[in-house]
Amino acid sequence: MATTDTSSGLSKDERDAVKQRAKELREQEKAGKNRAAGDKAVRDAIDEMEPDDKALAEGLYKVVTEVAPDLMPKTYYGMPGFANAEGKIVVFIQAAKKFKTRYATIGFEDRAALDDGDIWGVGFAVRNWTPAVEQKVTELVRKAVS
C-alpha cells in the first residue's frame, strides 16, 4: 500500500504520476500533433512494461491502430493511450504492475461514444489477451469512435 505524505495529501505514487503527466504535457507541447513523436512515446511506454502488461498493451495498440487509425498515440500519466483530433484521450491502458493491482484496466474517457442508456461501462479489467478479449476490445474501440 502506498504511504501518504500528510503535507500534500498525495502518496509517492500519486506524486510521481502528476510529475509524469507534467513532463508529458511539456513534451507534447513541443511535439505538437506529431504522430511519430506520439507513437514513439507510446511504444517506449509499452516497452517499459512488465511482460504480462506489455502483452495487453501490445494488443490494445494493434486494435486501435487497425480499427481507429485516426486516433493519435499519446501517453497519459505515463500510460499508453490514444487521443482524438482535439488531443483528448479516448482510450488508454493502465498497467497492473505499475499500480500494484491484480489486473490491468483498459479505460475510456468521456469523449468515447460508449453511451448506452443511463449507465455504461468505461473501464474494463483485463488479465489475458485472448481472441475473445481482442474481439470485445475491437467492438468497444469501434463504438467509442463512432
Image (cartoon, rainbow, N blue to C red):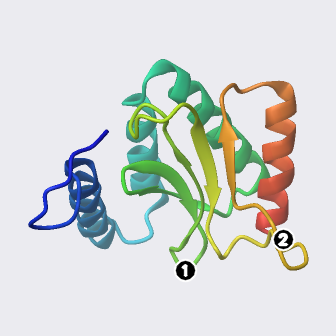
Q: Is residue 83 above or below residue 41?
A: below
What residue sits right under mark 1 in the picture?
86
Q: Amino acid at mark 2?
A: Ser
Give the residue displayed 59% in from the left and 76% down from the top. Answer: 85
In the picture provided, is 71 more to the left or to the right than 8?
right
What residue sits right under mark 2 in the picture?
146
Q: Nearer the viewer, residue 140 or 43?
A: 140
Q: Is residue 133 above or below residue 94?
A: above
Q: Residue most toward the right?
A: 117
- Residue 121 picture location, percent across and down: 76, 61
Q: Secondary structure at mark 2?
A: loop
Q: Residues within 10 Å of mark 2 (few under 14, many from 20)?
A: few
Q: Residue most toward the top?
A: 51
In the picture provided, is 10 more to the left or to the right than 84?
left
Q: How many marks?
A: 2
First in sequence: mark 1 vs mark 2 = 1
Q: Secondary structure at mark 1?
A: loop
